[in-house]
Image: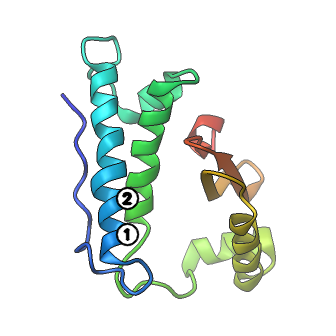
Amino acid sequence: MAFELPPLPYAQDALAPHMSEQTLSFHYGKHHQAYVNNLNKLVEGTGDEGKSLEEIILGAGPGGLFNNSAQVWNHTFFWSCMTPGGGGDPEGELKTAIEGSFGSVDDFKQTFADKAKTLFGSGWTWLAKSDGGLEIIQTDDADLPLKHGK
């Protein structure tokens, strides 16, 4: 079964003014869709056809298959992390884990923002769970924590 661009969980103008409808439409409808289309072309008629996105990512070496499958995952995750009217401090287990790893939510926010601002070129800044707790990591291009056991 071919991969499909998952529907957004909100309208394309719902994140304004933080992200404009034009920006969201371009990144979702053009970039994300292109990764889905490319991935489908790359797996068609191969042993990867029918595998889950995560199985493809974990089994792929460097190159087009990894880049496109990982970017499909990254962008799907990205869109699902935002909500209209969202924001505010985390609560519950996440708040406790953040405080345990960074001292406070405010310290986490500052560290995350500093890391994200210093990421050179294209890539992602992530809050990832590892054996030692939570950590902020940067990945280049399509790379993602999943590929590193996080």
Give the position of the N terminus as an image quadrant.
top left
Q: Residue at x 77, y 67 (%)?
A: 101
Q: Residue at x 42, y 53 (%)?
A: 75
Q: CA distance from mark 2 to mark 1?
A: 6 Å
Query: Is the Cβ of the residue at disc 2 closer than 8 Å to that at disc 1?
Result: yes
Residue topped by disc 1: 23
Q: What residue is shown with label 2? A: 27
Quadrant hosting residue 113:
bottom right
In the image, taking residue 5 as reference, residue 105 lies left or right, namely right
Amino acid at the residue labelled 2: His
Image height check: is 149 above or below 118?
Answer: above
Return the x and y of residue 61 as percentages of the image width and height.
56, 21
The kind of secondary structure element at disc 2 is helix
| x, y percent for residue 111 | 77, 72
Is residue 99 left or right of 63 when viewed as pictured?
right
Query: Amino acid under label 1?
Result: Thr
Label 1 SS: helix
Please state the horizontal and vertical placement of residue 39, each as a whole percent of the image: 34, 30
Q: Residue 77 lies in what quarter of the image?
A: bottom left
Q: Quadrant of the C terminus?
A: top right
The residue drawn where x is 73% and y is 48% is: 131
Return the x and y of residue 49 as percentages of the image width and height.
Answer: 28, 19
**Left/right of residue 86 with respect to residue 140 in the rendered view:** left
Q: Residue at x 42, y 84 (%)?
A: 86
Mark 2 burial class by Cα count in 10 Å: few <14, some 14-19, many 20+: few
